[in-house]
Image (cartoon, grey):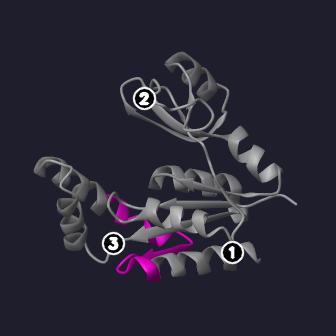
Amino acid sequence: MTGKIIIVSAPSGCGKSTIINALLERGDIDLQFSVSATSRKPRGEEKHGIHYYFLTEEEFRERISRDEFVEYEEVYAGRFYGTLKSEIDRITGDGHNVVLDIDVKGAMNVKQLYGDRALTLFIMPPSIDELRRRLEGRATDAPEVIDERVRKAAYELEFAPHYDAVVVNDNLAVAVEDTHKVITDFLSK
C-alpha cells in the first residue's frame, strides 16, 4: 500500500516543529520526515541524506529544469531549498506516510500535485499579539527581525482557509492531540 502525504505549515514561532517532533516521538502514527534538498554547504556535523540532500547551485537548478521538485524556493540569491519528488516517492512507495514541514506556497503546490493523497494542516497562533510575545520571549532575534517575522506571519495566515485543517496552538498539549486526531482521521480514510 502506498503511503500518504502530510503537509504542515505555520508561521515561525507557532510550535510547528515541536508538534511534529512530539508526534514522531509518540510513534503511534507511521510518519517519516522528508529530508529537504538545499544548495547551501553543510554546517557542523550535518550529513548528506540525513539532514539535507546537499546539492551545488548548478545541480539544484538542473533538477529544477528536469521538474524533480514538488516545491522549492530560492530563499537567498543562489541559496535554494526544496522537496524532491524522489524523496516523497521513496517514503510513500515503501508504504510509509511522509510529513513535510514547508511554507504556504509550497504546501499549495504539493496539494495541487497529490490531491486527496495529501493533507494540508495549518498551525495557527492564538493571535498575532501572542505570536509576537512568543518570538520576543525566545530572545533570539533583534526587534526588526521579529517585526519581519510578524509581517510574514500575517501574510501566511491569509492562506489558512485554503488548508484542509487548522489547529490553533494556544496550549501545546491540546495542539498535539488535535493534530494527532486530524492526521489519524485522514489516514483512516
Quadrant in the rendering for residue 44: top left
Q: Is residue 74 left or right of residue 116?
A: left
Give the class, few, some or many, for how many residues have Cα within 10 Å of label 3's Cα (few <14, many ≥20). Answer: many
Give the class, few, some or many, for how many residues have Cα within 10 Å of label 2's Cα (few <14, many ≥20). Answer: few
- Residue at 76% from the left image edge and 57% from the top image edge: 96
Q: Nearer the viewer, residue 104 or 29?
A: 29
Residue named by callout 2? 43
Q: Is residue 95 magenta?
A: no
Q: Earlier in the sequence, mark 1 or mark 3?
A: 3
* Disc marking residue 125: 3
Q: CA distance from mark 3 to mark 2?
A: 30 Å
Three-letter amino acid code of the residue under disc 3: Pro
- Residue at 52% from the left image edge and 63% from the top image edge: 20
Extreme residue in the front direction: 45
Query: Helix, strand, or loop for circle 3?
Result: loop
Estimate the x, y position of residue 61 in percent, counting from the top left.
55, 22
Q: Nearer the viewer, residue 123 or 134?
A: 134
Q: Is residue 173 magenta?
A: yes
Locate the N terminus and report the quarter of the image it occupies: bottom right
Query: Helix, strand, or loop for circle 1?
Result: helix
Q: CA distance from mark 1 to mark 3?
A: 23 Å
Q: Is residue 103 left or right of residue 66?
A: left
Residue named by callout 1? 186
Three-letter amino acid code of the residue under disc 1: Phe
Q: Earlier in the sequence, mark 3 or mark 2?
A: 2
Quadrant in the rendering for residue 2: bottom right
Give the class, few, some or many, for how many residues have Cα within 10 Å of label 1's Cα (few <14, many ≥20). Answer: some
Query: Helix, strand, or loop for circle 2?
Result: loop
Question: Which span of residues is magenta-colored?
Answer: 155-174
